[in-house]
Amino acid sequence: MKPEGDQTPRICPKCHNASTIRVKSRLWFELCFVPLIPMSSEHLWLCTICHWSVPLQQGWEPALPGYGFQPGAQGQWQAPPYTQLSPPPNAAQRGYEPAYPAAAQKPV
């Protein structure tokens, strides 16, 4: 398999890594382990991590890494809906503060 076309990594639908690339696979007629005649070729999307592959289809390709953005209705990029997160219930509590005895302090 040889890399082909735009080598921008895409998101693998199986392992969700940005490692899917476009490749060309060829089947060869071999004689004594020497490839002589190319029999057929196939264009594929291949994940280099989990080795998931699918034939190239018209109108479909794996998603580009979007970094948290989703396509909008008009084909434009827009941010996902923002949800306000509330602070955890113990956020107002202070952390561990050791208490030192008053006798150990030096007088001023």
Image (tube, rainbow, N blue to C red):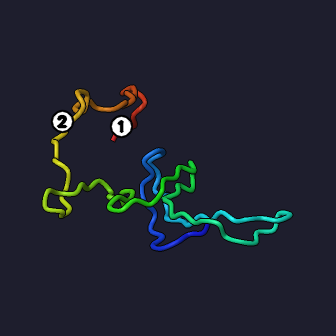
**Closer to us: 23 or 72:** 23
| Relative to 50, residue 7 above or below | below
Q: Amino acid at mark 2?
A: Ser
The residue that label 2 is drawn on is 86
- Residue at horizontal 70 percent and vertical 65 percent from the top: 28
Locate residue 55, reporting x and y percent. 48, 57
| Relative to 86, residue 36 above or below | below
- Residue at horizontal 42 percent and vertical 55 percent from the top: 11
Q: Secondary structure at mark 2?
A: loop
The image quarter in which residue 87 lies: top left
**Closer to us: 66 or 37:** 37
Q: Quadrant of the C terminus?
A: top left
- Residue at horizontal 57 percent and vertical 56 percent from the top: 48
The image quarter in which residue 89 lies: top left
Disc with the residue nearer the chain's start (2 vs 1): 2
Q: Secondary structure at mark 1?
A: loop
Mark 2 and mark 1: Cα distance apart in space? 44 Å
Locate residue 8, reporting x and y percent. 44, 68
Q: Quadrant of the N terminus?
A: bottom right
Q: Amino acid at mark 1?
A: Pro
> Which residue ends up furthest to the left in the rendered image?
74
Within 10 angstroms of label 2, few (less than 14), some, or many (20 or more) residues?
A: few
Q: How many marks?
A: 2
Locate residue 92, reporting x and y percent. 22, 32
**Closer to us: 34 or 104:** 34
The residue that label 1 is drawn on is 107
Tell whether 44 sits left or right of 11.
right
Locate residue 54, reporting x and y percent. 48, 53
Question: Of discs 2 and 1, which sits in the foreground?
Answer: 2
